Amino acid sequence: MPQDPLIASVFRQEVMAMSSYHVADATGLIKLDAMENPYEWPDDIKQNWLDALRDCQLNRYPDPEARQLKQTIRQSNHIAEEWGILLGNGSDEIIQLLLMALPTGASVLSPAPGFVMYKQLSDCLGLHYIGVPLLADSFDLDLPAMLAAIEKHQPSVIFIAYPNNPTGNLFSETAIKDIISAAKGLVIIDEAYAPFADASFIDYLGQYPNLMLMRTVSKLGLAGLRLGYLVGGTGIIEQLNKIRLPYNINILTQVSANFALNNGALFDQQTQAICAGRTIMLEQLNALNGIIAYPSRANFILFKTPENRANDIFAAIKQQGVLIKNMNSQGGLLVDCLRVTVGKPDENARFLTALQKALER
């Protein structure tokens, strides 16, 4: 299609060269593609939540600092008062804020494959993104390659997902510490899947001035709220607050997240159920002929299909009413790979049956 001269004259080439982030339509399907918590709230909890929302003053702007919510996040995550907290409309906004604050042409580095928004937003803002391939046999960090890339590119920001998305594994803690020590810029440990991992770098914040922690409540069970947060030195948080849009966390999100985090026992139960389902699903996947399922510390499992069959298997599973994520198109280490979110037991069973039938075709 010929390029529209108006668009060409207005927008940067980096933007025009990008593809938009695609979200698949899951209407009528069992949705196991987006790493969501499949469990809803009991009716009594829902009623208490609605009671909490009743007095929201929708005619007024929300607290621009979301002070009560920040305090609840601090208490529920054992974050010391010495650390600053920045709230974002999902982790995506926090990543965007971090990258918007960088000098023109700055370098951004992360392991690859990793969370797609590190590269997507870097490209959008005209920054120099470097993806350092993981080790093919284990999906672990290639520490020599990471250290060489840091030395060569001197990145302003390094993103490390812990556990990693889409591979699901926890990287070596020792390797991450070596990376933090070698970096002159910020190192953001993205702990989006912390509820399922039983591992965190939160206790190391005081040891490394360039270390920051990023988390989200989406995977915990509040994906519809779009709330993420960044924890780190108050001086860094102060700079990021200068470019954060005012009132970025609306009043319904503030009240709802505050209510939910004060009912943490419910999410603990749901997390335990998801982890138990993950163990069962991993065993059953690896029992299927031709499937290699990789160990996961998140709420999803990446698995490899027989050579050149990923697209057909994905389509066959979808035809049977189950939507998972096709990773094959990303290439590299993800060739022949699909990813499935751990759902409720009956949803997991439906997926496994659909996969078995797809393999027999």
Image: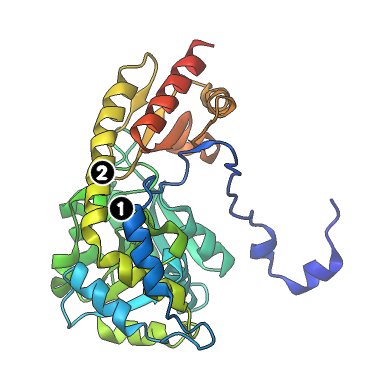
Please tell me which residue lies in front, 248 or 138.
Answer: 248
| Residue 324 vertical placement versus 252 (above, below) | above
| Tag 1 and tag 2, C-beta contact below 8 Å | yes
From the viewer's perspective, tell me whether residue 49 is left or right of residue 283. right
- The amino acid type of the residue labelled 2 equals Arg
- What residue sits 22% from the left and 44% below the top? 272
Mark 1 element type: loop
Report how far apart the C-alphas of labels 1 and 2 lie in the structure: 8 Å
Q: Residue furthest top?
A: 360
The secondary element bearing badge 2 is classed as loop
Residue 160 x/y as whole percent:
32, 57
Camera-side residue of 83 and 175? 83
Mark 1 closeness class: few <14, some 14–19, many ≥20 residues within 10 Å: many
Q: Residue at x 38, y 38 (%)?
A: 343
Type of residue at label 1? Answer: Tyr
Residue occupied by mark 1:
193
Q: Is residue 156 visible?
A: no
As drawn, 124 above or below 30: below
Q: Residue at left 43%, top 68%?
A: 95
Name the residue located 31 percent from the left edge and 54 percent from the top edge.
Answer: 146
Which mark is on residue 297? Answer: 2
Dot 2 alpha-carbon crowd within 10 angstroms: few under 14, some 14 to 19, many 20 or more: many
Q: Is residue 270 above or below residue 209?
A: above
Image position of 17 (left or right of 257): right
**Which of disc 2 and disc 1 is earlier in sequence?**
1
In which image quadrant can residue 190 be found?
A: bottom left
Residue 170 position in % (x across, y down): 24, 47
| Above or below: residue 288 compared with residue 303 | above
